[in-house]
Image: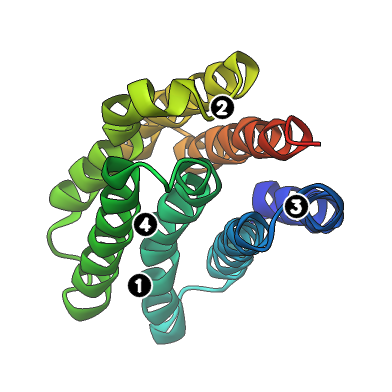
């Protein structure tokens, strides 16, 4: 909870700056993509902050559904600004729709079948996250090398964190896992910011 509280405070400042820059530099579509990303980031960190600080109770079990669901939303929201850059490419357009469709499926699984299919959910997280390799070709002309490298680094950080997410016998594994999440989110925020600044 503390880790995500720090991340949430930083994200509030960061998203405000991002929307400001997007307003100055971007088209209406790009601004909308920035807003979707910012909303997804803030929602995920807020829900996780609340869930991890909440005392053990039925309410905490209920909040767990939203906490795990929000990861799907964050992945799709993070992809949105990048894929929006190349929406004139039919493949990227279909991929954007597909990413959000999978996110919707993941949210449904987590909300309707809480505590079940957890391994499937982890596989979906990873599959969604690394599906971007399919779009490298089209995105090479839409994004800068800096943006692409930051996307890759963030993905590696998230993926490495999954090791600690499933390593439940390790002391403080939950805090370590969330540390990876916040760090990965920070790197991907930088990627989104470079995506918009490059358009100025």
Instruction: Single out the mark in the foreground, 1 or 4.
Output: 4
What residue would you read off at disc 1? 65
Side of 86 where 188 appears, left or right: right
Q: Secondary structure at mark 1?
A: helix
152, 95: nearer the viewer: 95
Q: Residue at x 44, y 28 (%)?
A: 139
Which circle marks residue 143 in the picture? 2
What residue would you read off at disc 3? 11
Please provide percent x and percent y for residue 107. 29, 69
Q: Secondary structure at mark 3?
A: helix
Instruction: Give me the C-alpha separation between circle 1 and circle 4.
Output: 12 Å
Return the disc, 1 or 4, that comes first in the chain's sequence: 1
Q: Secondary structure at mark 2?
A: loop
Side of 152 where 16 appears, left or right: right
Callout 2–callout 3 Cβ contact below 8 Å: no
Return the disc, 1 or 2, that comes first in the chain's sequence: 1
Instruction: Give me the C-alpha separation between circle 2 and circle 4.
Output: 23 Å
At label 3, counting other C-alpha atoms closer than 10 Å, the crowd grade (few under 14, some 14-19, many 20 or more) is: many
Instruction: Give me the C-alpha separation between circle 1 and circle 2.
Output: 34 Å
Q: Quadrant of the C terminus?
A: top right
Callout 1–callout 4 Cβ contact below 8 Å: no
At label 4, counting other C-alpha atoms closer than 10 Å, the crowd grade (few under 14, some 14-19, many 20 or more) is: many
Which circle marks residue 190 in the picture? none
């Amino acid at each position: 909870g503390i880790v995500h509280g720090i991340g949430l405070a930083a994200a509030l400042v960061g998203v405000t700056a991002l929307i400001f820059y997007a307003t100055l530099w971007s088209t209406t579509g790009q601004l909308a993509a920035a807003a979707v990303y910012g909303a997804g980031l803030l929602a995920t960190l807020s829900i996780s902050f609340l869930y991890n600080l909440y005392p053990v109770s039925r309410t905490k079990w209920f909040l767990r559904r939203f906490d795990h669901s929000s990861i799907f939303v964050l992945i799709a929201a993070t992809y949105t600004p990048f894929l929006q850059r190349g929406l004139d490419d039919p493949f990227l357009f279909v991929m954007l729709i597909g990413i959000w469709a999978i996110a919707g499926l993941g949210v449904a699984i987590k909300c309707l079948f809480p505590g079940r299919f957890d391994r499937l959910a982890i596989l979906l997280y990873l599959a969604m996250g690394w599906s971007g390799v399919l779009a490298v070709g089209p995105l090479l002309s839409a994004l800068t090398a800096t943006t692409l490298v930051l996307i890759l680094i963030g993905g590696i950080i998230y993926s490495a964190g999954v090791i600690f997410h499933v390593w439940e016998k390790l002391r403080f594994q939950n805090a370590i896992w969330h540390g990876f999440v916040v760090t990965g989110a920070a790197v991907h925020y930088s990627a989104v910011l470079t995506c918009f600044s490059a358009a100025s």
